[in-house]
Image: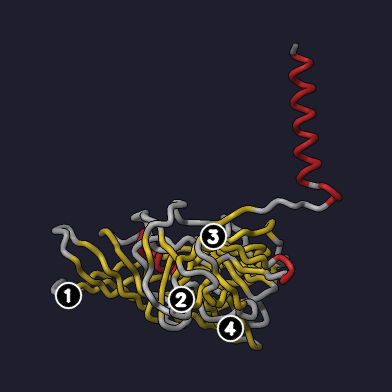
Amino acid sequence: MKNKVITFIITIASVVAITAFAGGTETTSEWLSYDDDTPTNSNSSFKFQGVRFSLPYDELKTQLLTVSFYYSGPGACPVTVHVTGFDHSTELITPMAYSAGNGWNNVDLSVEKLLVPHNFYVILEIYNCGSPVMDDDESYGRSFKGQFLQSLNSPLPHNLLIRSEIGPSIPIPVAREWDMNITEKVKTKIKGQKPEIDRSDYTETWTLFDDGSFQTDNELYGVWKQKRSKFAFSLDPEDLGELIADNFPFYVTSVLITNIKITGTEKKNGTIKGKYKVYASVHFWDDNWDSSIATVIIEKHFTGHRIDP
């Protein structure tokens, strides 16, 4: 009996292996979604409505295969599908015109060979003919609306039923790694209270990739560029907002990053020096459950060195 069980397990494993690697090519894919699968709430008439997607932990890039969305309308409603970077305005592909039916719609992007970064947006541009639909889940923070792509930063009260099918993770070569020593000052100002200042020193590694993306130890993602000795980084403001919210002492309802600036220099010998400054407006409920707003200013000075391979 034991031998029969072992034979059965081996057979099943073989079938799975053949299915996943038929022809020697991995064919696995997965869907990213944040809704509860229940199209319940009609949406506003804002021209642009979309969802911010994040790849699974530590994945930097993959192919976007399919976009699926639930639409409410009379049928054959014109929409434009945008896929952007984390700034919800840099187009990663030429916007696609689509005729949306009432219910689920699937847009096949596999032939486009579209690669998306760790954080990206799928946004629907609508034209006064129906609208995307939200679920009834009270969890939110991934769905946004705006009158323009650049202003797509007003959170919706529920999740849009917009989903993304992605392929396997694509490895990206590392351009360089930096070991950083950071001195940080965080100033929090709440109206009617004395400002609080927290200081800390810590180290972390910044990994810069050949495609212009980068990643820090605490899972912040963004893009980098360098001209001669001078460099500049752009962080994903939503990633940073989540980090601020996680470390805030009250219940946070939203974080709006109003400014991010990270600049510095790298000398020929590999030494690094720079500054990092962030301004954020944090909306929260205080101990008395009164709605309030705090201004958070994060200033960092960093030094470090390039890690030689």
Rendered location of residue 14, percent (x, y): 80, 35
Residue drawn at the location 75% of the way across and 38% of the way down: 16
Residue type, mark 2 in image? Cys
Q: Estimate the spatial distance between the alpha carbons at disc 3 and disc 2, rounded to whole Å.
A: 16 Å
Dot 3 falls on a residue whose secondary structure is strand
Residue drawn at the location 67% of the way across and 79% of the way down: 269
Q: Which residue is mark 1?
A: 191
Q: How many marks?
A: 4
Dot 4 falls on a residue whose secondary structure is strand
For the residues bearing labels 4 and 1, Cβ distance under 8 angstroms: no
Q: Quadrant of the N terminus?
A: top right
Q: Nearer the viewer, residue 223 or 141?
A: 141
Q: Estimate the spatial distance between the alpha carbons at disc 4 and disc 3, rounded to whole Å.
A: 45 Å
The disc at residue 129 is 2
The disc at residue 104 is 3
User: Upstream in the sequence, badge 2 or badge 4?
Assistant: 2
Q: Nearer the viewer, residue 16 or 188?
A: 16
Residue drawn at the location 27% of the way across and 71% of the way down: 188
Q: Residues within 10 Å of mark 4 (few under 14, many from 20)?
A: some
For the residues bearing labels 2 and 4, Cβ distance under 8 angstroms: no
- Can residue 153 be seen here? The reply is yes
- Can residue 217 be seen here? The reply is no
Residue type, mark 4 in image? Phe
Q: Estimate the spatial distance between the alpha carbons at disc 4 and disc 1, rounded to whole Å.
A: 36 Å
Q: Which residue is mark 4?
A: 231
